[in-house]
């Protein structure tokens, strides 16, 4: 196994535990926006998609790259926008 | 063009911003800001990537970014809050598709160049194909079940699990063959993609519509893990970190929901729950009478109640009754009562769905309570109002060991001094189980469309 893979595994395992710590403390009230927000984060695949789309290695690669960018961006923009739309509705009781 | 080391550091910044963003999600007061911070992290990652590229096809790149953003934006703006579970299912699917495509393109790139793919990269490519494909088609099936484009009932047939296991085994064998044989063969690659896409469909069809929330959470997790695998393929830390964060988020949410239903994840995924004909409890309907209540009487009860707890379920969402509910609560409070909302972890069709719908109707979030925080208060509650909820308030979960939901933690509405159940008819719940709450002496039923009933209640209470 290459060093890069080992480092990657270390980062993956640590981030998984960090994620568990962070998510475990999100109140149930916010679980829906949490899901859509986390979803938007998983759109980070767009980084890989951009690399593929830009590489210009024949049409198959380019078409796949283009589709990957589209899917990932729908995930990113759709995820963040809909999360924001939900979160702006959550208000505390106004003191009369 | 930016130096590679700076690029890596900027990716780290965006990973850190994701973490800060998730941290802010721990309170509704800071959550919106947290989401914006997370979005900033994403923007940084995208800009850094674009700047670092040797762009050979700028038109493709630009068009992809633009089309994806526009469609995503349009979806986010136009989706109804009621349809949020479908929206999240679709987003999961897109995430899976992106991982599948990137994995596929990386593989084809090396094959076309005639390069040998190192074993470790080979493994991560195969994993991102498998997980990406299962996430894509699994999510589409979940979407179809939630949207009721296809039946919400579990689809089962003999040898189902065996077939799935064999297909899974086939993927593993083909992947291994692909990784071990450096000379270019494309057919195992296509076979892996095809079988994985099929597996996504076959794994989700035997799961009932009522269990879709768990499936969506789990697929959310998969979309994260698929992203992390893509991160291994292209050796990028920010993908690995964010993929892991999302991966654990989905797993934790699935666990929370399984616990709320007192079932194991394995039971949800492979149990085909809700498939049989209504397995009524032994002492079902026969010999028991239901007491129905007029709108006028219900209004009187509510108007003079001190403590009111509203229990919303999916029926409230279907009837779009949340705004009328809020209006009713305002009136009760004006008359001196206190109104709170008790929300079961599996009420609605995704975790926290009811909260979003209530927030949409301007219900303040400090009035929404999770089961653990409000269950002991039902003893002092004058009127509990159950709106379109069924299984989550079924006392059989406490008392009847023969009930399929026995042992599931429920909201103890039957302990309230009086309980009004708003229901369309006497049909059984999503899980197809008879509910003895409806026959309890303290319970009165208010039949009809939830929205209409509540609107009528509002005008009655106004006159009192």
Image (tube, grey):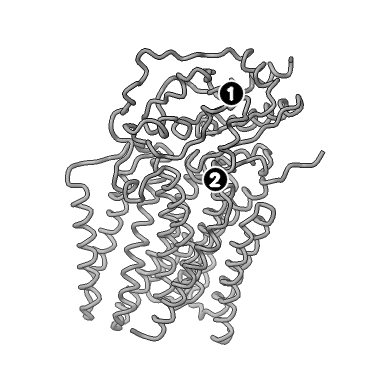
Residue displayed at 50% across by 62% down: A20
Residue displayed at 69% across by 28% down: B327
Image quadrant where one finds the N terminus of chain B = bottom right
Image height check: is B247 above or below B294? Answer: below
Upstream in the sequence, badge 1 or badge 2?
2
Q: Which mark is residue B352?
A: 2
Q: Are marks 1 and 2 on the same chain?
A: yes
Q: Is residue A69 visible?
A: yes
Q: Is residue B445 visible?
A: no
Q: Secondary structure at mark 2?
A: loop
| Residue under pointer 1 | B417
Image height check: is B362 above or below B315? Answer: below
Question: In this image, B172 relative to B102: left or right?
Answer: left
Percent across and percent down for residue B252 are 46, 56
Question: In this image, B401 relative to B61: left or right?
Answer: left
Q: Chain of mark 2?
A: B
């Amino acid at each position: 196994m290459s060093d890069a893979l080992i480092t990657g595994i270390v980062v993956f395992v640590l981030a998984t535990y960090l994620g568990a710590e962070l998510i475990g403390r999100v109140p149930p009230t916010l679980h829906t926006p949490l899901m859509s927000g986390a979803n938007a984060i998983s759109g980070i695949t767009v980084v890989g998609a951009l690399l593929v789309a830009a590489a210009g290695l024949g049409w198959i690669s380019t078409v796949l790259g283009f589709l990957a960018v589209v899917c990932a961006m729908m995930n990113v923009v759709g995820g963040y926008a809909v999360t924001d739309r939900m979160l702006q509705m959550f208000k505390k009781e106004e003191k009369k | 063009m930016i130096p590679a080391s700076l690029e890596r550091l900027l990716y780290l910044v965006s990973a850190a911003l994701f973490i800060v963003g998730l941290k802010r999600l721990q309170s509704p007061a800071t959550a919106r800001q947290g989401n914006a911070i997370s979005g900033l992290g994403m923007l940084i990652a995208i800009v850094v990537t674009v700047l670092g590229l040797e762009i050979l096809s700028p038109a493709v790149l630009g068009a992809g970014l633009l089309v994806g953003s526009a469609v995503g934006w349009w979806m986010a703006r136009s989706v109804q809050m009621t349809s949020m579970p479908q929206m999240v299912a679709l987003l999961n699917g897109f995430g899976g598709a992106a991982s599948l495509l990137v994995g596929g393109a990386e593989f084809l790139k090396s094959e076309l160049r005639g390069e040998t793919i190192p074993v470790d990269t080979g493994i991560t490519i195969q994993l991102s194909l498998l997980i990406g494909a299962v996430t894509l088609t699994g999510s589409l099936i979940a979407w179809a079940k939630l949207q009721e484009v296809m039946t919400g009932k579990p689809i089962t047939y003999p040898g189902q699990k065996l077939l799935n296991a064999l297909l899974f085994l086939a993927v593993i064998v083909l992947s291994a063959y692909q990784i071990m044989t450096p000379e270019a063969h494309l057919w195992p690659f296509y076979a892996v993609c095809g079988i994985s896409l099929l597996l996504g469909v076959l794994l989700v069809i035997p799961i009932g519509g009522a269990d879709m929330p768990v499936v969506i959470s789990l697929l959310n997790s998969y979309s994260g893990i698929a992203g992390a695998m893509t991160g291994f393929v292209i050796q990028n830390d920010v993908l690995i970190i964010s993929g892991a964060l999302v991966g654990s988020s989905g797993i934790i949410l699935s666990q929370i929901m399984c616990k709320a239903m007192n079932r194991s994840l394995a039971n949800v995924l492979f149990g085909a729950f809700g498939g049989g004909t209504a397995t009524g409890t032994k002492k079902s309907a026969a010999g028991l009478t239901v007491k129905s209540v007029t709108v006028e009487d219900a209004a009187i009860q509510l108007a003079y109640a001190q403590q009111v707890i509203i229990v919303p379920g999916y029926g409230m969402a279907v009837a779009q009754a949340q705004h009328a509910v809020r209006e009713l609560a305002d009136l009760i409070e004006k008359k001196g009562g206190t109104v709170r909302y008790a929300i079961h972890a599996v009420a609605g069709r995704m975790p926290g769905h009811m909260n979003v719908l209530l927030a949409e109707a301007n219900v303040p979030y400090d009035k929404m309570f999770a089961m653990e925080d409000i269950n002991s208060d039902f003893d002092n509650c004058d009127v509990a109002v159950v709106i379109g909820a069924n299984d989550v308030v079924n006392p059989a979960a406490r008392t009847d060991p023969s009930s399929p939901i026995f042992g599931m933690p429920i909201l103890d509405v039957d302990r309230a001094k009086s309980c009004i159940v708003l229901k369309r008819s006497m049909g059984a719940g999503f899980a197809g189980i008879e509910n003895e709450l409806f026959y309890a002496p303290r319970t009165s039923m208010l039949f009809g469309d939830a929205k209409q009933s509540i609107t009528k209640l509002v005008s009655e209470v106004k006159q009192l």
